[in-house]
Amino acid sequence: MAQLPDLRADDTRPLYVQIGAVLQRSIESGEMAEGERVPGENALMEHYGVARETARKALDELAKAGLITKRRGSGTFVREERRLIRKPRRYRRRKLLGEFATDALAAGRDPNVQATSTHVAATPKVAERLAIEPGAPVMRTEYLFLADGQPIQSSISYEPLDVTGGTEVEYPEEGRYANTGVITRMDVIGERVTQVSEEVTVRPPRTAEVESLAIEPGVHVFCVRRRFSTDERPVEIADIIIPGDRYSLSYEFRVTDEDDPATL
């Protein structure tokens, strides 16, 4: 356990803020390493001469900032940043694994996907995104993606059954094409995906997401609205929820001349 730093004599902020700030500096500087045990309430009370409520509030501030995690029966530890990396890249055809499994394996982690598919009628919002009539039959699939048993992201997808119904890829995660991804599955039935669009926003997690993804206080989520389309129509939409401490979004852009036709 790292040695506790002293407070500054000229700092006039509330004591719990001061204690939280010096601990935060120790974590961000690497003096307290990822996975290291953080001094608990008793240690903070003894070192700084404060009441338990002050020590508790200082630790609560670190938890809200996503810097520490509390393990029942074990104590409080510096959060480990074992993030998967999501990079924009060309989607490939005839691949053996979907995008999540590829990212998880690249991070040295074991991927697992839990999925439940049901036939439902398209709501007006789903219908608009799939360019179909409201009430048209669609396949709704709920996903939970795990790496080394830790939930990493969730997703709800919809596919129009006038495209996949009655085919061997009707149920996305069943049969020999399970876990291969949308593009490979659509190729099987002659639907050639030519465009993938994603829109990313950030917001606080909903109550159900906190429970299903074991999200710590203070952690926001990425919301990814995705759509796979052929030249004629959308064939799959999905709403993906990713806790902000599980993934890094990494981008690289090519610099070109202003009149380069490739940028038009």
Image (tube, grey):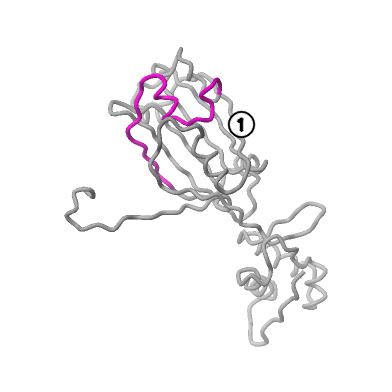
On whether residue 231 falls in the magenta region, the answer is no
| The magenta segment | 174-200
Residue type indicated by callout 1: Gln
Residue 250's spot in the image, x, y percent? Answer: 45, 54
Task: Between residue 122 and residue 153, name the one nearer to us.
Answer: 153
Residue at image point 74% right, 65% down: 38
Residue furthest to the top:
166
Residue at image point 59% right, 35% down: 144
Residue at image point 49% right, 39% down: 99
Residue 153's spot in the image, x, y percent? Answer: 56, 42
Residue at the spot of label 1: 114
In-image side of 197 versus 240 (left or right): left
On whether residue 199 falls in the magenta region, the answer is yes
Residue at image point 62% right, 36% down: 112
Residue 191's spot in the image, x, y percent? Answer: 36, 23
In-image side of 8 versus 3 (left or right): left
Q: For the residue labelled by badge 1, is the local secondary structure a helix, a strand or a loop? A: strand
Label 1 Cα crowd, 10 Å radius (few <14 / some 14-19 / many 20+): few
Q: As displayed, is residue 170 above or below residue 46?
A: above
Task: Between residue 147 and residue 65, name the one nearer to us.
Answer: 147
In-image side of 58 versus 89 (left or right): right
Residue furthest to the bottom:
10
Instruction: Look at the image and tell me in which quarter the N terminus lies.
Output: bottom right
Residue 211's spot in the image, x, y percent? Answer: 65, 41
Task: Between residue 191 and residue 217, name the one nearer to us.
Answer: 191
